[in-house]
Image: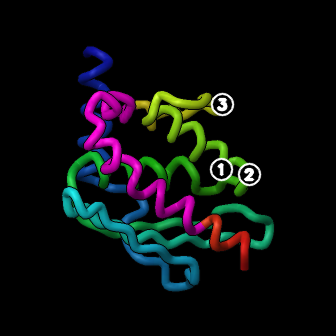
Amino acid sequence: MSLDALYQEIILEHYKNPRNFGKLDESRAKAHYENPSCGDQIDLQILINDDNVVEDIRFQGRGCAISQASASLMTEAVKGKRLDEVEKIIESFTSLMTGEGEITVELGDLEALEGVKKFPVRVKCAMLSWTALKSLLEREKKS
C-alpha cells in the first residue's frame, strides 16, 4: 500500500467513524466556527482540569471529509495532554498545513492531512477545528 493510499484510508476512517464526536455536558469552554466559503461547521467543547490537562474534548459539526477527519484526529492528538504540549501540537500542525514555521513535535496520524496543503482552499477545511481550539485556549488563559 502506498503512503498516499494509507493517508487517504486514515482520513476516510476518521470521517466515517469520528473519535470524540458529541457533546460534553460538564464543559463551560465552547466554540462555534464556520467556513463561509464551503459551509463546514464545527462546535468544539473542551474540559481542562486543574493541572492544565485536556481531560476531555468533543466536537460536533458537519462538512467535508477533510474538516471532520481533521477534528477527529485533533481531539485524539490533544486529549490527555498538558496545555503547553497542546500549544506545540497546534503550532506544528499549522506549520504542516502552511509549510511555514517548524514542526517541533511528532504529529503521528495528523501527517495524513499533509497533502491538503497542495490545495490552499482545502487548508481552511483542515484548520477549522484547530482555529476553534486555539481560540478556546486563548479564552481559557484570560479567564
* Position above or below: 141 against 113: below
Q: Quadrant of the C terminus?
A: bottom right
In the image, which disc is placed on residue 87?
1
The three-letter code of the residue at mark 2 reads Asp
C-alpha distance separating marks 1 and 3:
11 Å
* Position above or below: 10 against 32: above
Q: Residue at x 54, y 47 (%)?
A: 77
Q: Which residues are magenta?
A: 112-136
In the image, which disc is placed on residue 118?
none
Mark 2–mark 1 contact, CB under 8 Å? yes
- Residue 41 image offset from top left, x and y in percent: 29, 66
The three-letter code of the residue at mark 1 reads Glu
In the image, which disc is placed on residue 84?
2
- The residue lying furthest to the top in this view is 2
Magenta segment main secondary structure: helix
| Residue 17 magenta | no
C-alpha distance separating marks 2 and 1:
5 Å
Disc 3: which residue:
104
The three-letter code of the residue at mark 3 reads Thr
